[in-house]
Structures are given as C-alpha cells and as structure tokens.
Image (cartoon, coloured by chain):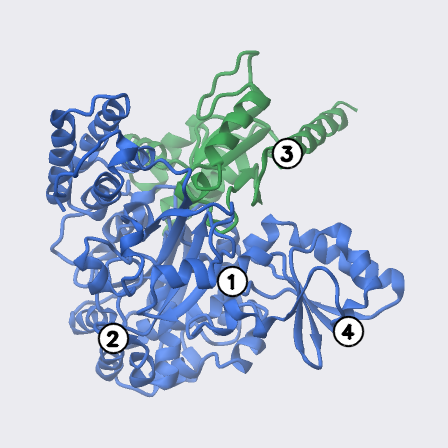
Chain colours: A green, B blue
C-alpha cells in the first residue's frame, strides 16, 4: 500500500528524472513513490526530457501500468487470459464482483470512493498455477473463491489496523 | 548440518514459500537442529510448489506443496533425513517428469542459488563466455549459425544470421537488446530463466555483445514481472563486481555493460520494433520494416534483439559446441525447446525437450491430463496468437515447419490446455477482444478489425449463424492476416479461424465448415 504524503511534483521530477535514463524508468520511480503519476509532473518532466507535454501525456496514457489517479487501498488484479480462463477465472471474477460490490475495470463504486478496486490483467506468468492474481504488490496463485475471500478479509483488516495507527 | 532448499522464484512465493522458509528456520531453532537454508530457483515442477528439498546421501529428497502448517509434522517425521511423509515425492532428480527431459538451457534451474556466482561457475557457468572470448566475432557468429538456433520468441529467425548482420554493420555504437516482454498467456520460460538462473541470460547477452561488437545491452522486462526485475538487477550487480561485466569482461579487455528497464504493461511491446520504440521513450508503436533492427535498431543503431530463452541458450552452445546442440531436434528445428505446460493441466511446469515431441505426449505423458479430471477438448499452442488444435492434430511432431504446414505455430512454446467445458466461440471472441485491447493502433485492420471481430462473433453467438455473418468473419480475418504490419493483427485470426474450423458447433454452426482463409 502506498502512503499518501503530498509530494511536490516539481521536486519529484527534479529528483527522479536523471538524464540518459529511459522515460519508463523515471515514470516507474515516480509511481513507486507517489502511488500514481501526478498531473503536475507532466510539465516539468517534459522540460527535463526535452519532450512536449503531449508526448509525455501520450506516453503515460498509452501504457496500462501507469495510473493518473491514486489507487484504491486494496487494488486487486486478476489475470483473465486464456490459461486462467481454462481454470475458472471468469467464474472467480464474478464471485469477486459480488463479494466486493465493485465492477472490474471501473472506477465507480455504489457507496462512494472504493476501498477495493478490481482490475483485469492479462498474464502474470503463473500459467501452470492458474488462476493467479495480485493484491497490491503481492502475487497469489491457485486462487479459489474461498482463498480470495480470506485474502480480502486479511487485507481489509490490515487496512483498518493501519488507519487506526495513523489516528493515534 | 543439513541443507534445505526452498525456492525463491515468484511461483513458489505466490504459494507462500517465504512463510514456509521462515517456519522451517523457526522450527529448527526451536528444536535445536542446525540447518542451512538455501533459496534455490524453481525446478520447473510447478504443480509441486512450494517444493522443499533436503540434501541426503541418496540425493535431494523433495516434499511438495508444503505449507506452514506442515512444517512441524515434517520435522516430526524426520524429513531432515529424507524420511517418508505424505508430502514426500522422493529423490527429485528421479521424478519421471524431470528425468525424461533433455534440459540443456535449463540444466541448472532449481539446483543452484540463482544469485550465487560460485554456484553458477561450479555448474558450468562462464564456459561458453570463455570460449567466445577466445574467438573472432565472425567465427562466433558462424558457430551460432551452425548450431541451428532460431529465435525462441516466436518468429524463429536464425539467431546467428542476426548477429552476423550486426557484426557486419559499420557504426560507432551497437546494442544487444533482450526482449523479456513475455506477454503470452501460457508462457513463463523467460520468467523462469530470469528468476532461477539470471547469470545464464547475462552470459548469453555478453557473448552476443562481444560476438557482434556491441558494448551495451538492455533487458526490457514486462511490468508484470517485478520479481524478475529485482532478481536481474541483483545478479547484474554481482556479475559486475565479479568482473563478468564492465570495461574488462573476464580480463579480456572487452567491454560489455548491461541495464534493465521495466516495461509499461503493453502486450504489443513484445513485438521487437514496438519494444525498441518503448525503450527510446516513445509509445510502443510498431515500426515498418525495413530497415531491420540489425541495421537500424535502438536509437537507429545496429542491434541484436533476441528474446530471453534464445539468449539463455547461447552459453551452452558456446560451451559444448554447435554440433552438440544441433544433434538435438529434427529437420530445421534444432536443439531443444523449453515447453510450458499450462492452463487446465494436472502436472503443469517446464518441459525442455528436443523438437519432435507430440502434443499428446506432452499433455498426457508429462502433464497427466487435465487438472479438472475432465477430457481434454483442445490445446492452444503458441500463446494468444496461436491456433487451437483439435485432437486430430495432437500427434504432429513439435517442429516449426510441421506446425506451419497445418497453419499452426510453435510460438514461444507455451501450451494451454482446455477441458470439455471450454467454449471455443467464447475463446475466439476473447482473442479479438484482446487484440482490440492491446493493438498499438498503427494498422487499421488490427485497430478496427479487432473490434468488428468482437461484434460479429457476438452476433453469431447470439444466434445469427447465417452465411453472411460467417463470411464476414472470414473476410475480416483475411484482411487482418494480410493487412497488418506485425503479428498482433496478423495472427489474431489464427485462434479465431482454428476455433471456427475445428469447433463450428460452439458457434452454433452445423455442417461442414467453409475452408479457412489461412
């Protein structure tokens, strides 16, 4: 989970955009630190890399990995490619939607800002141990509805505990 | 002191290997037993993960699917001496799935600690590089041509010819780029190589560099493989410290530097020119060829670009010679192919064999049939752009030309098994949907055709099985096949047409199918 401390976008870019580094590497570093690519980083990044803002924006939005908004505290990614489909990933996806009240690949939630987000992904490279998924940065294989429920509950509990700690 | 091995690759970790390792250490301490814990790579017997191994006089004895709650019972059963327990799978090297294989490229995986330079050298590492350093570049390229090694990423282009072209090009800078954007569902051999034997890739790329006069290498790893990125970065650091990389490779005076970059989650960046664009800081959009990357690749410079398994196969070829490698395989498909058994399969994992094995042998003799216990309906070979093979094609020897003859592809060697609950019309529609999601947008047949493909298959699935709809789908596939620059649009029709031709009943079609456009 990413702690959301406001970091000045210019400062982020000044620190992470090193000349000669691939744009991909710089954006990964920004997202790693800020949790997403803040809009304010685009202009300073364009200046630092000698690109137009349109080029930077086009780059960020072309790649599925980069997000322009903060992720939900519990971000679930389920593989929905062929190997996982052959082991019931679609039925699992349905279960996950019912269990969480979220829709896959949608940023909307019935009750306001989502604590959980469900995202489709296409191959996590665990095709002999399907279905596979990630919860935040952690990978899980041979996922069943029961296993998902247990992991979700553990994640929710960890979130509640973390929030309680912050309030102390 | 007993040595215990707990794998540290992402498959084992996804099933709780770290927790098992911690529990083993804690339990040993509690019992006052001294153990040495080694975090090895995966053996590729993935259905057994986490596979804990104990070194005994008889060999390394394995315990499969170990969970934290089993640990105390394993100690009680005296597993430190390889004793019987419900989870015991015997001496790992004797497991038929492994013993019957011809592991050349993957000879070391699971045996060694992936990040130990000593282990690597003790198991034959660097022999190939030392031989290559003693050769002229032209001879090294010729050796690779003679070995018959073809690109294992899917296109199967002779690797040595590529290297020779780069060597012959005149430029102030040349590059080696490793395509580690292994996006095909059902494939994981690149990941296994990077996580379980990263020095092998480093050695292969270094050989490519010194053979083609390239001094700089880049590994482009997909963002879905963060663990592989971490492992590679640590391995490169160690290789540099050991003098395997840098300004004076193994004291030869030759230079080779290596960097890792993580991709952005775009499937099409597995296409080599889109990958190069991405590496240059642009959207991953396919380039028209010519010019070929060997003459104008990264930053417009001559570039050797091969996938992970191709480059990882190089060290053994240089260590044992072209003839040794060429003597495996058949026809124009020489050497071995790391096949990945995936999907609905009982014993899933890595099977490295010489070309020529059949799908039936792989699925049943190695894979043990489906995981669900139901009959196999079909198998998709070669990733999302590969064909669905009906049972009548399960006895074709796995060989680039033999597969091409029936309109199928070997691709990256990934095979995804589906049982009889699979709906091929749904899978065909998914193939079109995936193309629509991942198309880079450069070619109209791919960008728009894929969306139209989803729609027309939906109409057929909704019951409009008229000749008009089926003709439209075939026509669309024909346009995509012949009107796309790269394999994304050009091969999406493969799964679609094979599903339509071999499983028309899933589309609600009766009678003889029309002949395929492909």
Q: CA distance from mark 3 to mark 1?
A: 27 Å
Q: Mark 3–mark 2 contact, CB under 8 Å?
A: no
> In the rendered image, which quarter contains the N terminus of chain A?
top right
Say which residue label 3 marks. Answer: A146
Say which residue label 4 marks. Answer: B81
Q: Residues within 10 Å of mark 4 (few under 14, many from 20)?
A: some
What is the x, y in percent for residue A20? 36, 52
Q: Is residue A167 above or below residue B112?
A: above
What is the x, y in percent for residue B85? 75, 63
Q: CA distance from mark 2 to mark 1?
A: 25 Å
Say which residue label 2 marks. Answer: B148
Do the residues at discs 3 and 4 belong to one chain?
no
Compare marks 2 and 4 and give the one earlier in the sequence.
Answer: 4
Compare marks 2 and 1 and give the one earlier in the sequence.
Answer: 1
Do the residues at discs 2 and 4 belong to one chain?
yes
What is the x, y in percent for residue B36? 74, 70
Q: Is residue B471 above or below residue B25?
A: above
Q: CA distance from mark 2 to mark 4?
A: 45 Å
Residue at the spot 41% in from the left edge and 41% down from the top edge? B420
Q: Mark 3–mark 1 contact, CB under 8 Å?
A: no
Do the residues at discs 2 and 1 belong to one chain?
yes
Would residue B255 be seen by someone viewing this image from the given angle?
Answer: no
**Secondary structure beneath label 4:** helix
Residue at the spot 32% in from the left edge and 78% down from the top edge? B328
Numbered label attached to residue B44: 1
Q: Mark 2–mark 4 contact, CB under 8 Å?
A: no
Do the residues at discs 3 and 2 belong to one chain?
no
């Amino acid at each position: 989970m990413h702690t959301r401390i406001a970091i000045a976008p210019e400062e982020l870019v000044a620190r992470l955009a090193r000349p000669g580094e691939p744009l991909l590497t710089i954006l990964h570093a920004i997202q790693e630190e800020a949790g997403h690519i803040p809009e304010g980083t685009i202009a300073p990044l364009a200046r630092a890399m000698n690109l137009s803002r349109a080029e930077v924006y086009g780059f960020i939005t072309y790649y599925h990995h980069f997000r322009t908004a903060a992720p939900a505290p519990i971000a679930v990614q389920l593989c929905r490619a062929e190997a996982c489909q052959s082991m019931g990933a679609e039925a699992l996806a349905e279960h996950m939607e019912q269990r969480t009240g979220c829709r896959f690949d949608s940023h909307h939630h019935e009750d306001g800002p989502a604590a959980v987000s469900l995202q489709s992904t296409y191959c996590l490279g665990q095709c002999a141990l399907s279905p596979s998924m990630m919860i935040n940065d952690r990978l899980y294989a041979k996922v069943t509805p029961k296993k998902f429920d247990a992991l979700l509950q553990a994640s929710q509990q960890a979130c509640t505990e973390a929030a309680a700690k912050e309030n102390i | 002191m007993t040595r215990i091995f707990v794998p540290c690759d992402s498959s084992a970790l996804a099933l709780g290997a770290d927790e098992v390792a911690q529990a083993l250490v804690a339990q040993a301490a509690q019992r006052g037993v001294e153990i040495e814990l080694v975090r090895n790579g995966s053996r590729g017997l993935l259905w057994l993960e986490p596979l804990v191994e104990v070194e005994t006089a008889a060999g390394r004895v394995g315990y499969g699917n170990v969970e934290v709650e089993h640990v105390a019972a394993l100690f009680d059963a005296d597993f430190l001496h390889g004793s019987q327990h419900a989870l015991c799978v015997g001496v790992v090297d004797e497991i038929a799935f492994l013993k019957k294989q011809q592991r050349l490229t993957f000879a070391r995986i699971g045996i060694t600690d992936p990040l130990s330079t000593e282990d690597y050298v003790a198991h034959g590492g660097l022999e190939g590089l030392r031989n290559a350093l003693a050769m002229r570049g032209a001879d090294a390229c010729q050796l690779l041509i003679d070995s018959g090694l073809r690109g294992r990423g899917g296109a199967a282009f002779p690797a040595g010819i590529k290297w020779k072209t780069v060597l012959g090009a005149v430029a102030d800078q040349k590059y080696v780029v490793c395509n580690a954007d292994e996006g095909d569902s059902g494939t994981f051999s690149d990941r296994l190589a990077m996580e379980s034997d990263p020095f092998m890739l480093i050695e292969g790329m270094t050989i490519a560099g010194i053979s083609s006069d390239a001094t700089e290498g880049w590994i482009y790893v997909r963002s879905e493989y963060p663990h592989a990125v971490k492992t590679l970065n640590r391995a490169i650091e160690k290789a540099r410290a050991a003098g395997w990389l840098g300004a004076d490779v193994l004291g030869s005076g030759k230079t080779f530097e290596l960097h890792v970059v993580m991709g952005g989650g775009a499937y099409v960046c597995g296409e080599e020119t889109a990958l190069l664009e991405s590496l240059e800081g642009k959207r991953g959009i396919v380039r028209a060829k010519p010019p070929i990357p060997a003459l104008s690749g990264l930053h417009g410079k001559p570039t050797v670009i091969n996938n992970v398994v191709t480059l990882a196969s190089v060290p053994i070829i240089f260590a044992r010679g072209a003839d040794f490698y060429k003597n495996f395989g058949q026809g124009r498909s020489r050497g071995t192919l790391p096949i990945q058994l995936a999907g609905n399969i009982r014993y899933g994992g890595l099977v490295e064999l010489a070309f020529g094995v059949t799908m039936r042998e792989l699925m049943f003799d190695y894979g043990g049939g489906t995981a669900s216990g139901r009959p196999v309906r079909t198998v998709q070979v070669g990733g999302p752009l590969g064909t669905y093979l009906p049972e009548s094609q399960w006895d074709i020897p796995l060989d680039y030309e033999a597969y091409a003859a029936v309109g199928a592809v070997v691709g990256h060697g990934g095979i995804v098994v589906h049982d009889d609950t699979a709906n091929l019309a749904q899978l065909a529609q998914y193939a079109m949907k995936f193309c629509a999601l991942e198309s880079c947008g450069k070619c109209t047949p791919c960008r728009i055709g894929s969306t139209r493909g989803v729609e027309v298959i939906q109409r057929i699935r909704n019951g409009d099985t008229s000749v008009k709809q089926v003709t439209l789908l075939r026509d669309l596939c024909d346009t995509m096949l012949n009107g796309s620059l790269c394999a994304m649009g050009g091969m999406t029709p493969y799964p679609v047409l094979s599903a339509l031709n071999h499983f028309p009943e899933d589309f609600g079609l009766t009678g003889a199918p029309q002949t395929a456009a492909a």
